[in-house]
Image (spheres, rainbow, N blue to C red):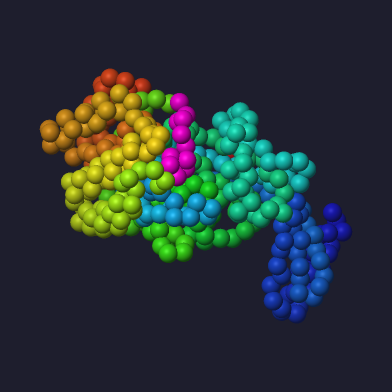
Amino acid sequence: MICFQILEQAYTDFAAAAPMPAATETLLAGWAIIHPPAGMQIIRNVTMRATAQAQPNIALIKYWGKRDAGRNLPAVSSLSLTLDSLWTRMTVEFDPALPTDRLELNGEAASGLLPRISRCLDLVAGTNRARAAVTSECNFPIAAGLASSASAFAALVVAASDAAKISADTLTLARLAGAVSGSAARSLYPGIVLLSAGDREILVETISEDWPLELVVAVTDESSKAVSSSDAMLRSAGTSPFYVAWVEQQEQDIATALSAVSSRDFSALAAVAEHNCLKMHSLLWTSRPPVVYWNQATMACMQTVRDLQADRVPVFFTIDAGPQLKAVCLAESSNAVAAALEATPGVRRILQSGLGAGARRISPR
Ligand code: PMV
């Protein structure tokens, strides 16, 4: 080790005395191999561990359908809210001594999710990387239609790139996260986020951070969904007679929602978001075999939102690939909305959140 330090110091002194192009580094199995232009090779041990946090995002104009399933590119653009009080924290440690990747989720080994985690690590750090120990903590139900994969893969790309000492901008990381979970790309960004499907690559950007919308989630069933969103999307595209119309109409829904956000027109946003959500679920209901993510409590929650709207409370609903209903409202009515949903038969618990930050590195605990 002393020998490496001496070599490294010698290279640093040499580089300072004779300015030359920057050295490049290859990260291999926990060692940084520095390739100075003069041909010298310096190897030093580096700590390859980092922790990141990301919050889930909830789409108001939904991503549903893939243009290119191999690259996981979306068929349509989408618009979402990044939350603040629900989170996933991921610690990635590349360790040359590990024979395989490992995943621990909320304190327990979770090998079922490992293939997607390993694929994401390969995309970020390359297939020659050292194996990694990944530790994940999540403060809300997983794989139950609450966008846990969005926050997980957004946090994973930030932690993995940091641990591997790869510097990448937010859009590059968003594209890597999106290649594993389409909606994860949006969790790299704060506030109200637009994901444009584009012709070749997705583009992601925050369009507003200063409209204080709140989200109230009525959790009706915490068990994992029977059909994954990826499988259900492929089924809709292949079998629903409405899929082509869905894709055709999406840019119009996006334009209507963007104009509602820019003019702070809550009722215009409510109308297009509910319409878009119900269209997405119509694709699911008309797929063969059909996919129905709702239960009776989901329907009862929709009625609660309709009753609040009749009382002129500014609120609307959206529902993803699961039975939870998400009510979006203005900050001043979030407690009334939460109380009404909590009193709805079949609701197990309520989660509340404002809008929050994009995925970011945090200090290891
Ligand atoms: O990113 P995925 O594969 O988990 O799919 C997300 C699908 C929806 O949550 C239903 C819609 C969306 O835009 O988030």
Residue 224 magenta-highlighted: yes
Does the magenta portion include 17?
no
Direction left: furthest residue: 311
Q: Which residues are magenta?
A: 223-235
Query: Which residue extends farthest top?
Result: 345
Residue at left 30%, top 28%? 298
Quarter of the figure with the N terminus: bottom right
Name the residue at 34% across, 30% down: 294
Q: Quadrant of residue 335?
A: top left
Residue drawn at x 33%, y 36% as measured from the top left: 285
Answer left or right for 82 relative to 128. Answer: left
Image location of residue 55, percent across then percent down = 44, 43
The image position of residue 302, as x and y in percent, is 24, 31
What is the quadrant of residue 313 in the picture? Answer: top left
Judging depth in this view, the residue of 291 and 82 nearest the camera is 291
Q: Percent from the top left, x then y, of residue 35? A: 76, 68
Left or right: 76 as drawn, with respect to 87? left
In the foreground, 202 or 331: 202
Residue at 76% x, 74% y is: 37
Residue 118 relative to residue 284: left or right: right
